[in-house]
Image: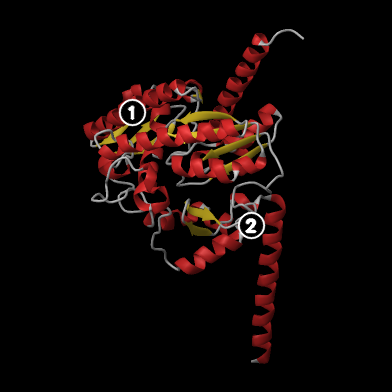
Amino acid sequence: MKSILGNVGLFLISVAVSVTAAELAARMFLDPVDYIKPTLAADAFLNHRVVGNTGGHDAWGFRNREVPSGTDIVCIGDSMTYGVAARARDSWPAALARMLGEKTYNMALGGYGPIQYLYLMRTRAVELHPKIVIVGLYLGNDLMDAINMVESHKNWSAYKTRDFSDLPPQMVYPRTAGKFLGDLRNWLSRKSVLYVLVTQLPLFNFVRDREIPDGYEDSDTRIEYHDANHHEVFYLNSHLRLLDLTDPRIKAGLEITEHAMIDMSNDAKRNAIRLIVALIPTKGRVYENVLHHTEHLTATPADRGKDVLANALRDEDTVREAITSFLRQQQIEVVDPLPALTLEVANQDLYPVTEGHPNSTGYRVIAASIARYLDAAHAEKDVRSPAG
């Protein structure tokens, strides 16, 4: 009996040592911020935030190695600026830094919107004394995020333009979903790079599929496109479509966004900061020209999915034009990466198959579009300046 217990003990110790060594090796070669789940906390002004120094994030809770004393550019946004579906070094703010040879600070988090952008501009961005602040305004859900913030947080009630208290909030973030052994899995996801690597293996796909929130993969609004260079799936469930111009909250969200942008512009001027708004399109809009090749497209049912997509893209174009016109009227700089994304997506996929966020190539295209805009604006300024 003693020998059996001794062998079991030795086996357990060997396993513990091996797992520890594997974890240390994983952390040596991989950036923990790309794997470890950070700790979220409620916030009266931001709705939610990452607790500093968790999940590889910096002391302020953002996806950077550290909080610098100063930086050239601050990039504020939501998950599209944070860089979901890509490594931190492949987010568009990080790619932009390499292209320009300047320091950037990524001040973004999933679920944020125009109200959070304004708050971060006032409370955090100015502390870094940047020359430029770039706001990544995502056309997919930022207007709904704006209305949700003013409806659910009394600190922002002054931005309310009308009352929607009788309607349920849309896509409250962060969302929770039931998990098998959820507490243990959440703890491991916050502590172990190795655990996250292992659970990303295809072997665990069946677990992820079972825990997708209800309605996300609604077959009534699923379309798939597949040709020699592309394979993409688009989920267009009505309750996940957050830019529907038939919803009165969208117009109110646009008004709130405009109000927030004016306040951001005023704050930028007071602090001698150049404010630029980058309009981040949805995946569907980026693929619009590709999807015209309908022989490669399947929808369930055939007409329903295509009609929903067409309506969504029409509404997005309407909102893009309205926001662009407003920003120019307010003399706020605006850059639109959509043309560059549309051109590049003709040759290759810029998004993972079932993901609404770009892959590393997609983020690089966004960064390159912004870099070209900055270079062109700089060259134009040099031309206008008198010779020394």
Q: How many C-alpha atoms fall within 10 Å of the one at disc 1: few (<14), some, or many (≥20)?
A: many
Q: Which residue type carries mark 1?
A: Leu
Q: How many C-alpha atoms fall within 10 Å of the one at disc 2: few (<14), some, or many (≥20)?
A: some
Closer to the camera in the image, 31 or 56: 56
Looking at the rendering, which quadrant does residue 244 occupy? top left
Looking at the rendering, which quadrant does residue 21 occupy? bottom right
Instruction: Give the residue at mark 1.
Output: 313
Q: Secondary structure at mark 1?
A: helix
Q: Which residue type carries mark 2?
A: Asn
User: At 52% from the left edge and 32% from the top edge, which residue is drawn?
Assistant: 266
Q: Position of residue 245 (x, y in %)?
A: 28, 33
Q: Position of residue 358 (x, y in %)?
A: 50, 36
Closer to the camera in the image, 287 or 125: 125
Residue 113, can we see it?
A: no
Quadrant placement of the N terminus: bottom right
Residue 178, can we see it?
A: yes
Q: Position of residue 166 (x, y in %)?
A: 23, 51
Closer to the camera in the image, 94 or 276: 276
Is residue 169 rendered to the left or right of residue 128?
left
Q: Position of residue 154 (x, y in %)?
A: 39, 53
Instruction: Give the residue at mark 2.
Output: 53
Residue ranking furthest to the bottom: 1
Circles 1 and 2 in contact, beta carbons < 8 Å: no
Looking at the rendering, which quadrant does residue 373 occupy? top right
Q: Secondary structure at mark 2?
A: loop
User: At 32% from the left edge and 37% from the top edge, which residue is drawn?
Assistant: 252
**Sequence order check: which comes first, mark 1 or mark 2?**
2
Is residue 257 positioned above or below 208 on the image? above
How far is disc 1 from disc 2 in space, using C-alphas? 39 Å
Quadrant placement of the C terminus: top right
